[in-house]
Image: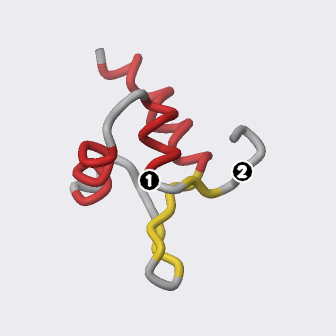
Amino acid sequence: MENKLLLTVSETAAALGMGRSKVYEMVRDGVIPSVKIDGCRRVKAAALRTYVDALGEAA
């Protein structure tokens, strides 16, 4: 998965150890940036890494 540029919501959920519903909620709220390509929602791997890295700073 580390070589992929774009992740599905399911892959994102697995990487974060969360459920898909929670990830969709976070995407909808703009917490995790995403893109839509021909109706397919994808999360940029780099954006996910940025989000995770920022979690420690917010604490």
Q: Residue at x 25, y 43 (%)?
A: 22
Bin the neighbour count of mark 2 within 10 Å (Cα to Cα): few under 14, some 14-19, many 20 and up: few
In terms of depth relative to the viewer, which is nearer, 1 or 52?
A: 1
Q: Residue at x 31, y 38 (%)?
A: 19
Image side of residue 17 versus residue 49, left or right: left
Of the image marks 2 and 1, the number of the one nearer the N terminus: 2
Q: Which colour scheme appears in the figure?
A: secondary structure
* Residue 25 x %, y %: 22, 51
Q: CA distance from mark 2 to mark 1?
A: 13 Å
Q: Amino acid at mark 2?
A: Lys
Does 1 appear above or below 33?
Answer: above
According to the image, label 2 marks what residue? 4
In terms of depth relative to the viewer, which is nearer, 33 or 24?
A: 24
View extreme (right): residue? 3
Quadrant of the frame with the N terminus? top right
Could you say which quadrant of the image residue 41 lies in? bottom left
* Residue 26 x %, y %: 27, 48
Q: Amino acid at mark 1?
A: Val
* Residue 50 x %, y %: 52, 38
Does 12 appear above or below 33?
Answer: above
Q: Residue at x 50, y 27 (%)?
A: 53
In terms of depth relative to the viewer, which is nearer, 23 or 44?
A: 23
Image side of residue 30 versus residue 56, left or right: left
Quadrant of the frame with the C terminus? top left
Image side of residue 48 versus residue 45, left or right: left
| Total numbered labels | 2
Residues at circles 2 and 1 in contact by the CB criterion of under 8 Å: no
According to the image, label 1 marks what residue? 9
* Residue 58 x %, y %: 31, 22
